[in-house]
Image (tube, rainbow, N blue to C red):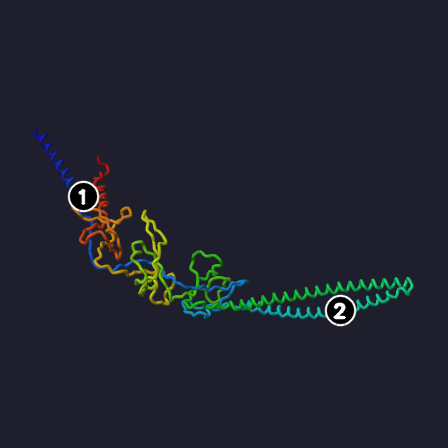
Amino acid sequence: MKHSIKQTGVFLALLSFAGGSIACRQASALAGEMDIPTATVKEADLQLKVLTTGALRTETSRVIAAPAIGGGTLQIIKLARFGVQVHKGEVVLDFDPSEQEYNLAQNRSDFQQAEQEIVKAKADAAVQTAEDQTALLKAKYTVRRAELEVSKNELLSKIDAQKNVLALDEAKRALAQLEQDIRTHGASNKAALDISEEKRNKARLAMNQAEDNIKKMTVTAPIDGLVVIHPNLDSTGGWYFGQALPDYHVGDQVSPGNSIADVIDISHLELSAQVGETDHSNLKPGQPADIQVYALPNDKFTGKVETVGAATSQDSWMGNSQHKFDVTILLDKPDPRLRPGFAARMVIRGDHLSHAVSVPSEAVFDREGKKIVYCKRNGGFEEQKVKLRALTEGQAILEGIQPGAVVALVNPEARSSQKAKENSSGPQLGPGAK
């Protein structure tokens, strides 16, 4: 009997322990529900601010390049300093003109020699023409005299008459040959003169080219702007593996056509950036912007929105697709320290909103392309659709919800599913347990 009572007591104790364990687990789950952080929907006057990053660029720049001249490399003898301000027409770059000056001297000598050859060819042709004319008159006279002798054949013996006929035929053949020789002499003289004139023209062209090349040895600024020297790609010998390269400087050998520097117009520097769909609708030209250039962390710059473009790209991340829009911001004041390519952070100050309804941005969630919040009601959280007007400084400006509502800062459904999964797993048995 005592043994039965003892067993009953043990059973009740075990039952009591199990019930207490279940009660603790339920209490823990309820406590987990209460752990969801919340925020209260507020109404206040706000100024929209759009945060983005971008890079400086210039509307106008010109490349300063070595002239495309054949004959090997060019040597720099003068180069403007990096960052110096130049005006249109000022010398930025000079190359050694020695080789081109030598070519000019050679071409000028060839030109003068060709001129002399033309003079000589014309003189020789004149002498030859005079000689040919004399010989022609003489040959014609011989033919005429032979014709007169033939006219006397009736009075002469048959043998003498035959001699006169043969003499006339010989005189005519000589005249015909001489006329042929004169035509040949004329063509030959003309060909010699043409060759000399072509040689002169070739020398003149080469001389003009050398003079033009000498002018090209001096490169001037095509616009007002700042000089930016390029890295010396010629120093790699044609191989470049990403190593840091020195800039071009005086004394360097440069391949014809290579870019040496840029002249950039820093009076109209602008920032190029992109914003998302939500921010795009809140931007318009003329809005002020505060700019922080990373390369100049101790300086503040200002500007204004210049253009707000159409969608140019589309980002897809974890199944969410968002269009990106181009935005350009024009700096209010130029600064000689700024360079195209410098990265910057921008805060664009948009419209002022009166009685704007806002919550922390983490309280807004995406559900099938719609924006929702989880409002706290009836001891739980209920899903409610809202319209997102803007995001500014961590706050979401909403429509479709009343001030004073309490919303979850995390997804209650996801938190609840996680708690349920943790509770259903139960305590883990240690090694060797049965």
State the residue lying farthest toward the right: 157
Please indicate, yes or no, whether residue 289 appears anywhere in the rendered image: no
- In the rendered image, residue 142, in percent from the top left (x then y), is placed at 82, 67
Query: For the N terminus, which image quadrant?
Result: top left
- In the rendered image, residue 253, in percent from the top left (x then y), is placed at 50, 64
State the residue lying farthest toward the top: 1
Which mark sits nearer the N-terminus, 1 or 2? 1
User: Closest to the observer: 329 or 140?
Assistant: 140
Q: Residue at x 59, y 69 (%)?
A: 105
Horizontal relation, residue 179 to residue 320: left or right:
right
Horizontal relation, residue 50 to residue 60: left or right:
left
Q: Residue at x 32, y 56 (%)?
A: 275
Residue 49 image-quadrant placement: bottom left
User: Closest to the observer: 242 or 406?
Assistant: 406
User: The disc labelled 1 sits on which kind of residue?
Assistant: Ala
Q: Total marks drawn? A: 2
Whether 354 is drawn above or below 419: the answer is below
Residue 29: image tag: 1
Whether 35 is drawn above or below 294: the answer is above
| Mark 2 closeness class: few <14, some 14–19, many ≥20 residues within 10 Å | some
Please indicate, yes or no, whether residue 344 appears anywhere in the rendered image: yes
User: Closest to the observer: 234 or 285?
Assistant: 285
Helix, strand or loop under label 1: helix
State the residue lying farthest toward the left: 1
Helix, strand or loop under label 2: helix
Q: Residue at x 49, y 68 (%)?
A: 218
| Mark 1 closeness class: few <14, some 14–19, many ≥20 residues within 10 Å | some
User: The disc labelled 2 sits on which kind of residue?
Assistant: Gln
Query: For the C terminus, which image quadrant?
Result: top left
Residue 225 image-quadrant placement: bottom left
Residue 133: image tag: 2
